[in-house]
Structures are given as structure tokens and as C-alpha cells.
Image (cartoon, helix red, strand yellow):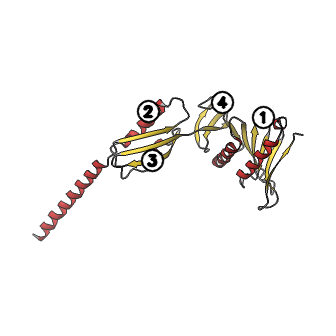
Amino acid sequence: MKYLRKMVVLIFGIVFVAALVICVGRIFAVKNVNVNLITYENDCTESYAQIKDTLKKYKGSSLLFLSEDDIAKSVSGSNYVVTSCEKKFPCTINVTLKERLEVFAVSVGGIYSMYDNDGIYLRSAENNENDIDGAENVLLTGIAVEQLPSVAGIAMSFKDTFGGLRSIVTSINIDSRPNIEGYSDKLIFNMRCGLIIQIDDYKDNSFEKITASYKKFCLLSDRQKMSGTIRGYRMGDEIGIINADYSALK
């Protein structure tokens, strides 16, 4: 009898827990998925519909166990990234997605691989034409795939400082000579006007060197901006000041 009582209590306990789980699941089941798109398209109706359809699968799932990582995985491989994911209890998710901006191109075997402003792969194409405006993307040369994110980050600093990237820069390359002892790698921005911006030892204080280069750029005449090189560098040792100078084309 004693064991029977324990068995009954156990069964009732299991039934109660199961009922509780079912009730909680129903109460906190996702019913609404609200999507806000930050996009560069004039008409994003089609993109919005596709994203809504992608995230529709989360309807009915438990809001308690749904994470931003789950949402991010759902849109990985698309032209959007998750910038925020807010749970509104009991049954709503508010998701904000930002369009990945196509900026860079890498030519391999006659085919261009396009990368976004974070240096992450987007798509491949026969021509170097931006998916949005049809203009050329910034061509990256001499840069390994694993270097793309760091170079892209520096390029965005260049864009913020100079007020543009694709509109004023045709290509970016790294001048690296590992066979020469003590040679510092240089990141080179080839500008459409004909000028070259060279950042020496670019992994060290790149933003400050770009800023110094911009100040020097602003002092140049229109004629000087058509050729020559501005070099951003650190004078002396690692605690030396950061400077930039201009050398005319010889």
C-alpha cells in the first residue's frame, strides 16, 4: 500500500509537470514576428517578404528558449545580419536586420568574388559591378582571404575620414616583402584622382595614420592630388609621433 501511494504521487507529479510544460508552452508560444529592415534598396518589399517567410518557422516555438543566435543562423548566407532581437512577452519577437553593404571585389580566375563592408563573402559575378548601383566595387589585390576582415575594418576608417570609399578609391593592396628583414607591410589606397595613400606598418595605429594622411591631403593643391603619394607613418620608435608627408611623382 505504501508503495502504491508513492506510485500514485509520482504519476500525479509527472502529469502535473507535463501539464505545466504544455501550459507554459502555449502561453509563451511565438505568435508574432515583427521585422524591421535597414536597407539600401528603394523598394524592399520583396526582401521583406522573403525575410518574413524565413522567420515564419519560429511561430509556435517557445519564446523562453529562442535566442538571438537562432535568428542569426536563420538569416546567415543572406544579404542581412541581425542587429537586434527583442523578446516581448508573452508571444512576440521584434527583429531588426541590416543589409550587408557590398563594397569589395577580389578577382580570381576571371571571376569576381564580392565582399561586404566587414570583409565577409557575399556573392560571385563575371563583372565587377555593385549589386545595388552597378558601379565598380573597390578591387582588393595581394590580400589573403584571412586578411580581408582586418583590411575591411581599416578601409571603413578610411571611408569615415575621407568621406567616401568606392567613390574615391579604385583599389587597395598590401605591399608585403617577407624576404626583406625589417620591412614593414604597407596598405595602399589607389585613388581615382591619381593619388596614392600609403599607410606604413598598417597594423599599428592605422586610424591615426589615416587621419594624418587626410590632413596632409587637405593641404594639397588640385594639381598635386592628381599624382604622387601621401605616406602615413610613425616617426622613430614605437612611441614616436605619427606623421604624414607628400612626395610628388618623379
Mark sitting on residue 162: none
Observer-side mark, 3 or 2, equals 3
Q: Write down the residue under mark 2.
A: 49
Locate residue 220 relative to residue 10 in the image: left or right.
Answer: right
Residue 43 higher or lower than 181, as above or below: above
Residue 71 at what x, y percent from top left? 44, 46
Q: Write down the residue under mark 1.
A: 193
Q: Label 4, secondary structure: give it.
A: loop
Amino acid carrying mark 1 in the image: Cys
Residue beneath the point at 82% across and 35% down = 222
Residue 136 higher or lower than 82, as above or below: above
Residue extending furthest left? 1
Observer-side mark, 1 or 4, equals 1
Find the distance from the CA under tag 2 to the CA under tag 1.
42 Å
Amino acid carrying mark 2 in the image: Ala
Q: Write down the residue under mark 4.
A: 135
Residue 83 higher or lower than 8, as above or below: above
Mark sitting on residue 85: 3
